Image (tube, rainbow, N blue to C red):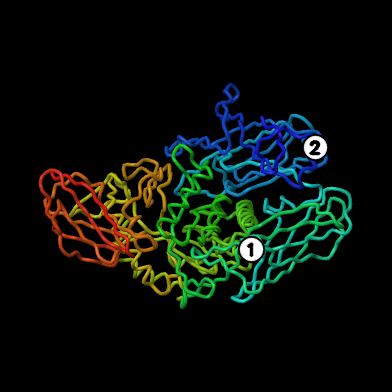
Amino acid sequence: MFRLKGFALGLCCACLPGWADAQLRSRYPLDGEWDFRLEKNAPGGVWEKVTVPHSWNARDGITPDYYRGTGIYRYRLSLPGGVSDKRWFLRFEAASQKAVVRVNGQEVGTHRGGFNAFCFEITPYVTDGENRLEVEVSNAKELHIAPLEGDFTVFGGIYRPVSLLALPKTCITPLDYASPGVYVTQDVTPGRAALSVLTKVDNGQKAQKGLAVRASVYDADGRLVVRGETEKADVEKNGKAEFVNTLQIDRPRLWDGRESPHLYRVFVEVCKGGRVVDTLSQHVGLRYFSVDARNGFMLNGRPYKIHGVNRHQDRPDKGWAISEADHREDMALIREIGANGIRLAHYPHSDYFYTLCDREGMLVWAEIPLVGKALPEPGFEADVKNELTELIRQNYNHPSIFCWGLCNELSKGDVKGLIGELHATARREDAGRPTVLAANVENRPENKVPDLLAFNTYPGWYWAEPSEMGPTLERWNRSVDGKGVAVSEYGAGANVWHHWQTGRKTPKADGVFHPEEWQATVHEQTYRAVRDCPFAWGSFVWNMFDFASASRNEGDLPGMNDKGLVTYDRKIRKDAFYYYKSLWSDDAVLHIASRRDIARRDSLAEVKVYSNCGQVRLAVNGRDCGQPVRTENVWVWKGVPLKKGENRVEAAGERGGESLADACKWVLF
């Protein structure tokens, strides 16, 4: 049961009789106990107590027969007197994949799509006192809801937060595709930033005369930078109006990637006479960028090649129902490795994570869940276009997002028309960001539709050898007439408890044995080709973290895609993680690879170290191992003798006056 408390962020305190006058708008997280049961257990099923975010596949999501069906959630809202003084809305940040919302037995709305937010007004349905909320959620496969295919588990449930919004009668609308209702468009040069602030106002009462919108911009220190107010306008009863403020900032401080992710705050006030009737804040970063074959990716006028990772959002025993602390841990690991970009695959991610990307200076590829297969039917196309519109409007103000992804690996059928419709939708909604798709078949007709092209390829894993990455880049670039490409996925699987030493064959991608050493070798060779390619504007490792894929059974990890650089539980950084960290991070790095390969059978070992130190020394059992073969940050000592029993392997180096050391133990049998 939820009883309204008198604080704008929903913190607990005594219920206040005069609450309605306390603030203009309030948000109350519905994070208490919900009643829940699966439809397959009804009508005799027992209701259980859960907290939202919640997924019913938290435990079975790595099994091939995980439940895809319907779950029912119930919640009791206890509202104070004076309900009619406000407008009431329910905002769901996501529910997978279809949700039907009812209040006091009356249906208030249905949402299709498992990843974007949705919002319904419930003002006509609530009363003073107790109200009953019921949400019917289904993650069953439906022909009109993307994704129709995909190499990942589709977890069911209300897996992101739910909020009750109490807004003024005349308010900045939350119903424009569940967006903030405020859109900040920017035209930035080094010496000037021209801003256009569009505010959508919804009048839920009698006609209002003389409404205006004031927009103020504050810097990161809270200092007012510029302010402007629109001309007054009348809004009819239950009508809508749009107000545009045009502002200019001279010599703006730019949002400059990881080096300086400066954020301004745009504070919008809806005014009537001398009274403010509603307010809203949005953080924005001012930046400009371009992409072409000659210069690659340019951020604020300088080369800024993207070296990034892909990310899925699930966790063990949680599925997609992860916490803000989980999001922060993911970001901390991505920061640690030194990435400057993230492809948020294969669907819209949490607004909280996009916000973290803004704050940390990450460049983000955001995309819709059009994966693997599309249906040439009006219903499917309409739903996918709606998901793209939701994605763009809800995330329009995030400076970290630099492109809108239209699809991933549509390798069957004629989909050029659909991609053309999606491209047109994205350009209409946001002319300031390019579109992109992730292809896996060369010369498909749709590959030339978006502004940018990227491709998924796995030399050294699904085909050929890692050395094929260079020629592959050349072929893909020719296929788009030399305008430049990015690598949206590349990599190899690895089980951290699987190892080989010397003389082994390339492992089978669908086999049981996925040695950590081969993953590292694949990344060393493939990334080197991407980094040195002048027309490759970026790359994204597949994947930052292992993730659930219920249909897989390989690498001795059923239900798991093990291509992550970090294990599913985020506890172990694989060797390849340190390869990238030594290249991308400003931190000093010294890491002995194959450290978990403790049981040794060869008396002569190869020792590999990843390090960005100027010099690295290796000693085994106290004996110096001499000079290594060095390829950039990869240091290799061949033919290092091991003794029977325990061997202590020690590496040491220095970088920037900082002394580093690493050690492990191997046992020769």
Viewed as shown, does residue 585 lie left or right of 613?
Answer: right
Q: Pointer 1: what residue?
A: 219
Instruction: Indicate the amino acid at tag 2.
Output: Gly
Viewed as shown, does residue 176 lie left or right of 586?
Answer: right
- How many dots with numbers? 2
Viewed as shown, does residue 373 lie left or right of 513?
Answer: right
Given the current orientation, which residue lies at the most extreme top position?
A: 44
Task: Identify the disc placed on residue 136.
Answer: none
Q: Pointer 2: what residue?
A: 18
Q: Answer whether residue 440 is visible to the viewer in this image.
A: no
Q: x and y percent of residue 147 in the render?
A: 53, 49
Viewed as shown, does residue 439 lie left or right of 247?
Answer: left
Q: x and y percent of residue 93 in the render?
A: 61, 46
Front residue of this view, candidates 664 and 485:
664
570 w.r.t. 611: above or below: above
Q: x and y percent of residue 150 in the render?
A: 47, 49
Front residue of this view, candidates 64 and 199:
199
- Determine the secondary structure under disc 2: loop
Mark 1 or 2, nearer chain start: 2
Quarter that holds the N terminus: top right
Instruction: Indicate the amino acid at tag 1.
Output: Asp
* Residue 355, quarter of picture: bottom right
